[in-house]
Each structure stands twice: as C-alpha cells, then as structure tokens.
Image (cartoon, grey):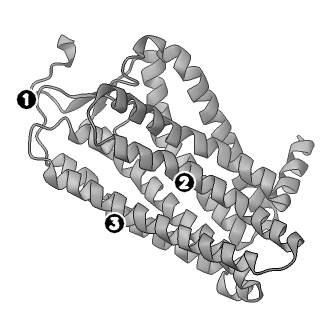
C-alpha cells in the first residue's frame, strides 16, 4: 500500500481500484464484462447501420433509436476500455485530467440519454393519443432539434461537475474504490470542503432525473388512460405492445441508476459494494439489452436486421 500513499505535492494521479474485495478475480470478472461490451457495440452499431441504410426506417421513432444507441455506445466506451486495462494488466493509474475527462463525457451521455427517453415517451404519446397529427407534430427535423437541445442541456449541467472537482485539494489517499471516475467516489477523496460538490450533484439528480421521470410517468399515465377508453381488445394489445419496449428500456435505465445514486450516499462497506456492482450493471446491461429489446419488439427493425444478417 505504500505505493498508493501519495502526498499532496505528488503529481495528481489517482488509483482506480476496480471492484474492491474482488481484485483476485478481476481476470474472471473481465470475461462477462468484455462479452457484454462487445455484444452492446455489435447490437448498437447494427441498429445505426440498418437505420442509415434503409430509407423506410428514416422516421422519428427510428431516429430516436439511433440517438439511444449513440448514448449507449458512448456511456459504455467511456468506462470499459480503462476497466479492461485494470482487469487485464492492472493499469490502475489515471491522471486528474483523464479522470475529469472521463467523468464529463460519461455524465453528458447519461443526461443526454435521459432526454432521449423523455422524447421517446412523448413520441409514443403522440402516436397513440393523437395519431392523425403525428406526422406534423413529430418530424425528423424536430426530433433532431430535440436531440440537440438534450445534448446542450447535458453539457451545460454536467460541465460544473469536473470544474468543481478541480478546485478541491486531494491529500494522501487517492485510491478510487471504483472501476471508473464516479463523481461522488472522487469527491470523497478530498480533504477539503465538499458541500458545494455534493449539493450540486444532488440538485442534478433530483431536478433533472427527477423531472424527467415525472414527465415520463405522466406521459405513460395519459397513454394508459387513452388506451383503456378504447373498446377494441385488439387495439389494446397493439397499443400496449407499442409501449412495452420503451417501458422495459426505461426501467432498465433508471432503476439501477436511482438505486446506485441513493446507495452512494452511504459509506458502509456492504452498501458501497452493492453500489459499485449496480453502477457497473447500469453501464453494461442496458446498452447490451436495448438493441435486443427493440429488435424483438419492433417488427420493421427486426425484419430489416434479419435481412442484413441473412446476407452475411
């Protein structure tokens, strides 16, 4: 441990510890991690490729799927290359600038994804509750503008996070008990006043993620109410089938994130380990499963993907 006892005059190097308590099993842990990552890249790039190639898929819903795929690729790629270096080669060191860069892009992709999920909920609301005006309300150009607004919102909200961390003093302990530069995990290493950092982190979580979740829940509440007013059972099944994929993706995206955010406020070893595992699952499982969910539930996309796979 003497190698990790860095003084405040040392260069700003942090040590990413991977998964605490399981260091001896890092090689074995890397097998499912790398497998999940490869599957997520293949699935999401397949979605991007098929939608780009097929003119019939140049619609708002599939444009949103491409945005979701890009955020999935971005989030997992911000973390996995460095994580695999830790697992395979024990390259645990990361500079302060590298840590802040990873933190910035990771949270930008995460907040942008939340905006994309909100837009997808609104897309389903218009498609089911006001189908006659769908083509005029949600055009490709309007969806692209909404995606750009979501990205700008993410950059403006996330940019203060690394700036607030940079002003903190770091003393002897620079060991991050994580496999990536998770914001609160880095803040906890400071020997200075972190009240501003913690408060801003909580504000982002409550205001942004909270408001996005409230909007999504209200939207699907209105969708369910509209569907229940339809007398035809066939129409019920069609409407609910349309929303099933979106609901599954949103549950997989928000549930581990919210639980991870709550558990990160506690310092007990058992809770901290649960938090780290959930954080890793949040970055690996949804990007891997999202293309599968939409490939199964969206007939147009499923048929086009099958066509390209059969050509190989």
The x, y position of residue 49, in whole percent, is 73, 53
Give the label, 3 or 1, closer to the camera: 3
Viewport quadrant of the C terminus: top right
Please determine whether, in this image, residue 130 is positioned above or below residue 46.
Answer: below
**Left or right of 228: which side holds 80?**
left
Could you tell me how far apart the alpha carbons at marks 3 and 2 are, in whole angstroms?
17 Å
Q: Secondary structure at mark 2?
A: helix
Instruction: Judge by depth and name the residue closer to the eye, 29 or 106.
Output: 29
**Left or right of 160: which side holds 90?**
right
Residue shown at 85% from the left, 73% from the top: 235
Give the label, 1 or 2, closer to the camera: 2
Please determine whether, in this image, residue 296 is positioned above or below residue 139.
Answer: above
Q: Earlier in the sequence, mark 1 or mark 2?
A: 1
Q: Which residue is mark 3?
A: 156
**Residue 213 seen by the camera:** yes
The x, y position of residue 290, in whole percent, is 66, 49
Residue shown at 19% from the left, 33% from the top: 12
Q: Which residue is mark 2?
A: 71
Residue 9 is marked as: 1
């Amino acid at each position: 441990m003497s190698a990790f006892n860095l003084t405040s005059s040392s260069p700003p190097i942090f040590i990413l510890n991977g998964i605490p308590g399981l260091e001896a099993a890092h090689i074995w842990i890397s097998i499912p991690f790398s497998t999940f990552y490869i599957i997520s890249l293949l699935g999401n790039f397949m979605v991007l490729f098929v939608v780009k190639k097929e003119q019939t898929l140049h619609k708002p819903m599939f444009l949103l799927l491409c945005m979701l795929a890009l955020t999935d690729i971005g989030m997992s790629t911000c973390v996995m290359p460095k994580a695999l270096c830790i697992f395979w080669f024990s390259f645990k060191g990361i500079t302060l600038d590298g840590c802040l860069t990873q933190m910035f892009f990771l949270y930008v992709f995460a907040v942008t994804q939340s905006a994309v999920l909100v837009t997808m909920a609104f897309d389903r609301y218009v498609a089911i509750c006001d189908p006659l005006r769908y083509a005029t309300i949600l055009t490709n150009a309007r969806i692209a503008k909404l995606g750009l607004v979501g990205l700008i919102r993410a950059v403006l909200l996330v940019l203060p996070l690394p700036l607030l961390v940079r002003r903190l003093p770091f003393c002897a302990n620079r060991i991050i008990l994580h496999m990536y530069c998770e914001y609160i995990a880095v803040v906890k290493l400071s020997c200075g006043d972190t009240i501003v950092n913690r408060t801003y982190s909580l504000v982002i979580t409550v205001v942004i993620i909270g408001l996005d979740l409230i909007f999504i829940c209200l939207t699907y509440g209105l969708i369910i109410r509209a569907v229940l007013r339809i007398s035809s059972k066939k129409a019920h099944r069609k409407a609910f089938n349309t929303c099933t994929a979106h609901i599954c993706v949103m549950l997989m995206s928000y549930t581990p994130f919210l639980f991870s955010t709550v558990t990160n406020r506690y310092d007990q070893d058992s809770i901290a380990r649960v938090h780290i595992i959930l954080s890793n699952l949040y970055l690996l499982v949804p990007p891997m499963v999202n293309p599968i969910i939409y490939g199964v539930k969206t007939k147009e996309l499923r048929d086009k993907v099958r066509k390209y796979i059969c050509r190989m």
